[in-house]
Amino acid sequence: MKKATTTMESISTNKEPSPAQLIDARIRELGDWRGETLARVRFLIKQAEPDVVEEWKWRGVPVWELAGIICTGETYKAAVKLTFAKGASLEDPSGLFNSSLDGNTRRAIDFHEGDKIDEEALKALIRAAAALNTARSKKKPKTA
């Protein structure tokens, strides 16, 4: 197997790469089911919330935001983890959350090789997280 290059090495540009370019590079670097899964959930996030903003934080974590963090997309050897920043406040009627269930704030979905993604349920969860962020941002008082 060919040695994977670092994210920065895989981007040939003279200026600072955008978060989207860094996420693209991460997907290419992975080159296996994890890259395919990350690409698929990224597509579904953008389909569910077209105004979502992609960020690259904490030395290499894809983050999707709309009036705050919706979720992050970490990749591990055996899983792609979609962590919802305010997941504990979201209804999950389809039971997608299967990780970080004991916390007071976050909830996560671990995707493993061969897992089928319930795309409609995931998009509904993304929309609910964005709506929660938007509602909370409207309640914050404006400072002068």
Image (cartoon, rainbow, N blue to C red):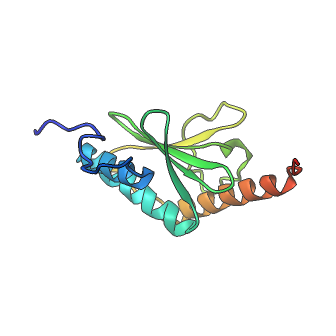
The quadrant where residue 4 appears: top left
Q: How many marks?
A: 0
Q: Position of residue 119 (x, y in %)?
A: 48, 63
Whether residue 80 is visible: yes
Relative side of 30 to 107, left or right: left
Relative side of 34 to 104, left or right: left
Quadrant where the N terminus sits is top left
Tell me the residue at 74%/58% (across/down): 134
Whether residue 115 is visible: no
Query: Foreground residue, 74 or 139?
Result: 139
Query: Foreground residue, 7 or 42?
Result: 7
Tell me the residue at 30%/40% (across/down): 8
* Residue found at the very far top of the displayed protein: 102
Tell me the residue at 87%/47% (across/down): 143
Q: Position of residue 35 (x, y in %)?
A: 31, 49
Relative side of 98 to 5, left or right: right
